[in-house]
Amino acid sequence: MDTRRALLDALGDGPVSGPALAEELGVSRAAIWKAVESLREEGFAVESTSEGYAAPERPGYSAAGIEFGLDAPYEIEYRDRLPSTNDRARELAAEGADGVAVVADEQTGGRGRLDREWVAPSGGVWLSLVVRPDVPPARAPLFTLAAAVATADACREAGVDAHIKWPNDVLVGGIGSDGDGDASDGRGGRKLAGILTEMEGEADRVSWLVAGIGVNANTDAETLPAGATSLLEELGEPVDRRRFVATLLERFAALAGTPDRMDRVLPAWRERASTLGRRVRVDTPNGPVTGTAVDVEPPGALAIDTDDGTRRVHAGDCEHLRDADE
Ligand code: BT5
């Protein structure tokens, strides 16, 4: 582990003296001092106290701020503004990066699936995680589902009762008749977050995978498309994005950090999904499929009971239907 990250981890447990830390890490005191200075330059204002170095009281939303207290093996690259965190993550992936999360406060060219636009004003959580899992490309959809679970959990921990619509929209409301009569409710709820996974693979192995996660965190609903909502809108106050991102990454690592844990992904997804048991219409590349969603099957297909038997769909836009829609 590098000195900077080790210092951040040590600061998480309270003040730490430079000499003690140098000894613990087996590096020079000058190396510790350099790491302290570089954190300060990043805006992470390490304090010098009589007990040693101490973390700032309110770490900002920055690389060091997010890595401080982060219990997941990821490095953060933070930018105030990027065209798209997925594009930057793809660049890093091409250079061989593994376990790096690109985070931006604002995106000017955010992308959804099928080259749709993703609106990403300042205040949101726009994040793309590069990983190089040792799995065949056919298992890649599991990472998207894991990202949806991690996102829903981070939203829930922030106090918003989020659920997942197949395959990976994170929504609020719209289950049954929630009574607010909002036009978006018929489609399954108000959209809080979306996920765009991109990958490059060889025949038998994923070479890299980018999980792009967009969460409307501290964004005014007026700046978002119709049918969207934000954590700010749902809670009436801003969330701590630093803690939110850390929770999300920790949940993702716990589910998808190592291939042997991946069998937990589908059960976790099912528990948080609002799609199963619902009447749905999925617009697939081969046309619409309408029926009752009965299960999600490895590695992420939706099984739908239709008048012509059970159909399995692997990709598409899913709409939750109300009786009135049929
Ligand atoms: C998605 O696409 O939901 C995937 C969105 C992924 C965004 C993240 S942000 C970090 C990373 N960097 C990127 O450039 N992208 C990823 P899809 O299911 O195709 O939904 C797109 C549709 O959602 C659009 O056509 C709009 O109707 C709607 N939409 C656009 N911006 C939105 C927003 N901020 N909140 C809710 N809905 C939005």
Image: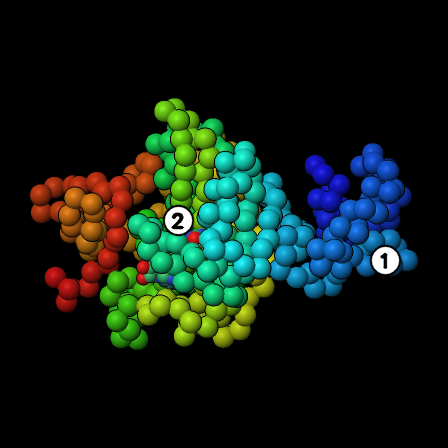
* Residue at (70, 64) in percent of width and height: 58
Graded by Cα atoms within 10 Å as few (under 14), some (14 to 19) or many (20 or more), the crowding at tag 2 reads some
Frontmost of labels 1 and 2 is 2
Which x, y percent locates residue 148? 41, 50
Disc 2: residue Cβ within 8 A of ligand 1's nearest atom: yes
Amino acid at pointer 2: Leu
The quadrant of the picture occupied by the N terminus is top right
Residue at 25% x, 53% y is 318
Residue 306 in percent (x, y) is at: 13, 47
Residue 309 placement (x, y as % from top left): 12, 41
Work out whether mark 1 precedes mark 2 in sequence or the reverse, and give the earlier one.
Answer: 1
Query: Left or right: where does residue 101 sit relative to residue 228?
Result: right
* Residue 137 picture quarter: top left
What residue do we see at 42% from left, 71% from top? Answer: 223
Where is mark 2, residue-wise? 196
> Which image quadrant is residue 216 in?
bottom left
Which residue is identified by label 1? 48
Relative placement, left or right, of 308 versus 166 is: left
Residue nearer the viewer, 225 or 155: 225
The one of 176 and 318 positioned closer to us in this rendering: 318
Q: Secondary structure at mark 1?
A: strand
Q: In the image, 243: left or right of 18?
A: left
In the figure, 165 relative to 205: above or below? Answer: below
- Identify residue type, mark 1: Ser
Pick whichever, 52 or 305, lies toward us. Answer: 52
> In the image, ligand 1 is in what quadrant?
bottom left
Q: Quadrant of residue 104?
A: bottom right
Is residue 244 something one can see in this rendering?
Answer: no
State whether residue 202 is above or below residue 305.
Answer: above
